[in-house]
Amino acid sequence: MVRADAMLSPPPGPTESGDRRRLRLTVTGTVQGVGFRPFVYREATALGLAGRVRNAPAGVTIEAEGPAAPLDALVDRLRTAAPPAARVESVRVEEDGAPTGLAGFAVEVSTLDGPGAAAVPADLATCPECLAEIRDPSARRHRYPFTACTNCGPRYSVVEAMPYDRARTTMRGFPLCADCAREYADPSDRRFHAEATACPACGPRLALTDMAGGLLARDDAALAGAVAALSDGRVVAVKGVGGFHLMVDAGDEAAVRALRARKARPDKPFAVMVGALDAARALAAIDDTAAACLAGPAAPILLLDRRAGGAGIAPSVAPGLPWLGVFLACTPLHHLLLDDFGGPVVATSGNRADEPIATDGEAARARLAGIADLVLDHDRPIARPLDDSVMRLVAGRPMALRRGRGLAPATIAIAGLPGGILAMGGHQKAALALTRPGRVEPGRHLGDLDTPEARDGHAAAIADLSSLPPEPPTAIAVDAHPDYHATRAGEAAAAHTPRREPVRVPHHLAHVLACLADNGVVEPSATLRRSPTAEGRARRHLPSRCAAPDGAGQPTDLDDDAILGLTWDGSGYGTDGTVWGGEALVVDAAGWRRVARLAPFPLPGGEAAVRDPRRSAIGLLHAAFGEAWTDRTDLAPVAAFTPAERRVLAAALARGLNAPVTSSVGRLFDAVAALAGLAVGPVSYEGQAAAALEAAATGEEAPAYPTALTDDGELIEFDWRPMLDAILADRHGGADAGRIAAAFHAGLAATAAALARRLGARRVALTGGCFQNRLLAESCIAALRASGVEALWHRDLPPNDGGLAVGQALWAARVLETEREEEGETPCASPFRAG
């Protein structure tokens, strides 16, 4: 007799041994490497039950026998009282025959039999108990940089295969000494079956080397040498959990400038690492939510509002921005380094632009030559590279901007989702996703796929994700853009699957679906069930009706289960031959359709306009005024070009040469930043102009710029021309950039709410890279709520292309199910079928 998770207690009934029964329990989710087996041992022993617990490919299996009431209590405890880092997805309860008379409860060796379904645990920041140990002169692990227990330490960065046991991690090369072995075998010790445990006698060691590989010091002397180098203004490459950081003194302007010059990173902000929350509070405003996020097991970089005066942080750390990326020391090594150094350090990824982070000393010395002065290395191998995770508080809750150490590979449960769909993600901020039965596993951040090294990392991540635990892909999902490296890699991989061809998923649809999954609204009886396969059928338009520009008038009411997705980002492949990026999509039981867009404008120079906001501004001016824009030399983006350059640009725009049309809100941000005088030259990192516009608007108040919603019979358009007129009038009147930026953000939020009212939307998903902007996201959320509309925004998945693969996987599941139905096969359960 097998029970579903919804019915967790075992069924009543007589057994062959009176009131004693024997159960077999299978617990799935993130239940390995998080202290789950010791937890089961303690609970079962306290309840007087006999049996055994072990890791298995499916999760954790438990055999327990005893009276009915304690067995019921054990099952309830599995569901409600699991360790903090565990995520229980299901508890399967089976009668396992008559009691066998077992005595005592045991933690047994893992079994390798059965299908793989266990979720891989994420790395956990140092727990308070281990932190106290390394600071206690009387403790055996005093100042030991690799101290860990069942509550903290490396997991995803060291595991090589599942089930999660020491023999299948990179710790297998460090046999336990007698003292550690006693702790490992003691049920009362917090290192009971702690696979990453070690001590100075048997564990990894530190080494400080020069860039030629010459050994300078070991162990505590190595740490002291690194601290001295930081104090001298030098750049030190420090090996952490998922790879190397490049570190300098965050208060030393010359050192920070030197790091910028060596890494060819002139403007993009650096993150700052501190040792404790009090040190973080000296740098930034931190409320209870921020404190919980910073000090949580993921220990991400968190973007925070800076305190006035900067608390000794060098101006070049985050030039021109009112926020600062701050994170706490996440390993004993980092805690010891910061304790000894006595102040905050810049800690940025140990790589060159568009390359994966270095993970071993030899690679660090080779690839970081000319950047770092010294390397603080250790001999615990890293199984896979992991950048630091990045988060931001939006409307009172954390939102992921990058999934790396501490967040990856935490899964998202989606009932009925089939396994085996590998989604390849996009070209920028690349990340994969793999579905397993009932859940999707988003992969780690891989970066942009512009270099051979990044593409090699993408290929390695495909093999890695499919092997933990083994899940050979049965279908591949890719972005619709034919020239993305990820698309081409997916096409090659699909040739080895039963379908032979990948499922091509529109870029902005994938964004919306990722947001829905992130908010738990993809359900068996709700959105996206039984959708047609053909894109032409899926993209049917809503009937249009006239309405006033402010959204008043007769609305086009959506079905109750429909969700309006505002996908505002930089650019994505459009199905009509244009570059999309300011779209409104409806997803419902019938599929998806594009119902509105930003009024398009040209991008002179194409890709060059992405790197130069002035070009977006000129495209906007050309769309509004024709060639008359060339006379507006009172405007910074026009004056920045010489008369000859303006003539060339005007001729190209008039002929449509290398001037693709876009509906991108991201490019609109660039244009407005240039018109406001904030971005009058090429940018050095993606989103730089938009960040400057958000920074200028922060703390400012201004009436919303006007916009209009027009209708061409098929699509509603968000017409930016009234907004542009108001911006130009403000510039002529001497308004500063802060007022223009604030009015622009307010105008976008008002437009989002007006469009929701126009369409009769009840729920609106806010997604795409533009919603990394906290001011934009919070303004839209507030405007929607004021209109009685529920706003959905991202949580665990980034709104940028880092969440794209999850949406691709979900749409591929729908396509595959529909294909099975059309071929007359009995469809499997999926989140896209009627309940």
Image: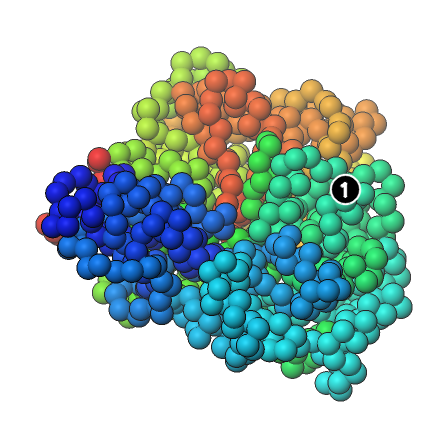
Q: Position of residue 687 (x, y in %)?
A: 65, 48
Q: How many C-alpha atoms fall within 10 Å of the one at disc 1: few (<14), some, or many (≥20)? A: some
721 left or right, relative to 689 = left
Q: Quadrant location of the C terminus?
A: top left
Disc 1 secondary structure class: helix
**Placement of 97 over or under 258, stated as above or below:** above
For the point 75% across and 85% down, the residue is: 215
- Is residue 591 among what the camera can see? no
- Is residue 25 among what the camera can see? yes
Q: Position of residue 86 (x, y in %)?
A: 45, 51
For the point 45% across and 63% down, the residue is: 486
Type of residue at label 1?
Arg
Q: Position of residue 777 (x, y in %)?
A: 58, 33
**Placement of 410 over or under 619, stated as above or below:** below
For the point 61% across and 44% down, the residue is: 293
For the point 58% across and 40% down, the residue is: 398
254 left or right, relative to 185 = right
Residue corresponding to mark 1:
281
Q: How many marks?
A: 1
252 left or right, relative to 8 = right
For this rendering, which residue is in front, 132 or 731? 132
For this rendering, which residue is in front, 103 or 466? 103
Q: Position of residue 305 (x, y in %)?
A: 74, 39
783 left or right, relative to 163 = right
